[in-house]
Image: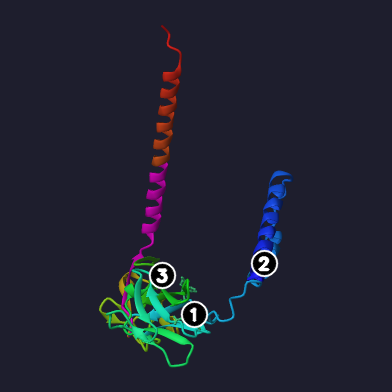
């Protein structure tokens, strides 16, 4: 305890000195206290202060390997793990932050929600909270607490995700006639990589051997699977809705518009004209305002 007090006072002195230096640096010279100085002093603080205040010999603590961020899938069991050293006769509890709900105490499950379960093997250091069928709403902060006085806690963030399919480029795609339609479908958060990813155009399933020709598909499966559809030399008949359907994730769709040669030029011209009109409008409003301002502020002539 004495050592701790000594550490505290030296840390206090250090921080006072630090503050003093800061005042000097701030008022006297223009040079700011640089990052290295701050870094060195904070390191010194840590080594002088924190190391001289070790937890008392019999205090429990969380193992450094206790995870702080866990990702789980909707409907698939997930375990929040807490590793505690030197627990002795204290109790480990799991608390949900959202509503300060006590979920488990020691080996007992407290909540009435049947999906939650306390898991602990006798004489092991692991105190787990298992959620049998997690939902999106179970995402959030949880805390593993040790019943010391005051209690100490270790926060764990649980992130429950759902299988997700997206086609990059958004729900509408505009393509020039003759150019390549390039659609990339991304499948994420599936329990295992999809065994198949099927593309359709309108009612038709897209095959390599379709009469259309010039179609290629490249699929890469993994934690994040992608499937790229390339349709070369796009023409009017290639317009329409394309879907990407993995066997184990939702279907994503995008509408492709194939623009014939003249349209984009006409659109650009129209656009340029509108913006010119708009500039003219702003300019005339500005002139009008200036005119009125000068007029109102000129000395009255009576
Ligand atoms: C947890 O990890 C995921 C990715 O694995 C990340 O997106 C998220 O921001 C992390 N959350 C926290 C609170 O660290
Ligand atoms: C744990 O044991 C210590 C003695 O070693 C005792 O003073 C303390 O009250 C006990 N705590 C609990 C929660 O049983
Ligand atoms: C298709 O688009 C992706 C980016 O979305 C790009 O990396 C790739 O090179 C493109 N492929 C072709 C053949 O244009």
State which mark lies toward you, 1 or 2.
2
Q: Position of residue 122 (x, y in %)?
A: 44, 93
Callout 3 secondary element: loop
Which label was assigned to residue 7?
Answer: 2
Q: CA distance from mark 1 to mark 2?
A: 31 Å
Residue 280 seen in the current view: yes
All told, the count of numbered labels is 3
Q: Hey, which quadrant is residue 257 in on the image?
A: bottom left
Q: Earlier in the sequence, mark 3 or mark 2?
A: 2
| Other-residue count near label 3 (Cα within 10 Å), few / some / many at <14 / 14–19 / ≥20 | some
Residue nearer the viewer, 71 or 182: 71
Q: Position of residue 301 (x, y in %)?
A: 43, 8
- In the rendered image, the vertical position of residue 253 relative to residue 296, given as above or below: below
Q: Earlier in the sequence, mark 1 or mark 3?
A: 1
Residue drawn 64% across the image and 64% down it: 8
- In the rendered image, the vertical position of residue 279 relative to residue 244, given as above or below: above
Residue nearer the viewer, 163 or 278: 163
- In the rendered image, the vertical position of residue 284 relative to residue 62, given as above or below: above
Q: Is residue 13 magenta?
A: no
- In the rendered image, the vertical position of residue 279 relative to residue 31, given as above or below: above
Callout 1 secondary element: loop
Highlighted magenta segment, given as a residue range: 248-276
Q: Earlier in the sequence, mark 1 or mark 2?
A: 2
The residue at which mark 1 appears reads as: 67
The residue at which mark 3 appears reads as: 178
């Amino acid at each position: 305890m004495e050592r701790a007090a000594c550490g505290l006072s030296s840390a206090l002195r250090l921080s006072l000195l630090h503050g003093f230096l800061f005042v000097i640096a701030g008022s006297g010279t223009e040079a700011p206290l640089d990052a290295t100085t701050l870094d060195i002093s904070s390191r010194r603080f840590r080594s002088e202060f924190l190391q001289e205040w070790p937890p008392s010999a019999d205090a429990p603590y969380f193992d450094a390997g206790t995870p702080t961020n866990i990702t789980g899938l909707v409907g698939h069991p997930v375990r929040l793990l807490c590793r505690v050293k030197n627990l002795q006769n204290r109790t480990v509890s799991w608390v949900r932050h959202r509503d300060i709900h006590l979920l488990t105490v020691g080996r007992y499950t407290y909540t009435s929600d049947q999906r939650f379960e306390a898991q602990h093997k006798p004489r092991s250091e692991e105190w787990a909270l298992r959620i049998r069928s997690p939902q999106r709403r179970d995402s959030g902060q949880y805390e593993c607490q040790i019943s010391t006085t005051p209690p100490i806690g270790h926060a764990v963030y649980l992130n429950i995700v759902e299988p997700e399919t997206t086609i990059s480029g958004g729900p509408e795609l505009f393509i020039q006639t003759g150019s390549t339609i390039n659609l990339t479908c991304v499948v994420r958060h599936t329990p295992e990589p999809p065994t198949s990813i099927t593309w359709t155009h309108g009612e038709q399933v897209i095959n390599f051997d379709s009469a259309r020709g010039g179609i290629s598909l490249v699929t890469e499966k993994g934690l994040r699977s992608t499937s790229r559809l390339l349709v070369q030399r796009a023409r009017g008949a290639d317009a329409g809705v394309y879907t990407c359907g993995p066997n184990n994730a939702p279907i994503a769709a995008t509408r492709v518009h194939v623009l014939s040669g003249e349209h984009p030029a006409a659109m650009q011209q129209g656009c340029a004209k509108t913006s010119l009109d708009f500039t003219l409008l702003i300019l005339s409003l500005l002139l009008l305002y200036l005119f009125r301002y000068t007029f109102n502020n000129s000395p009255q002539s009576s």
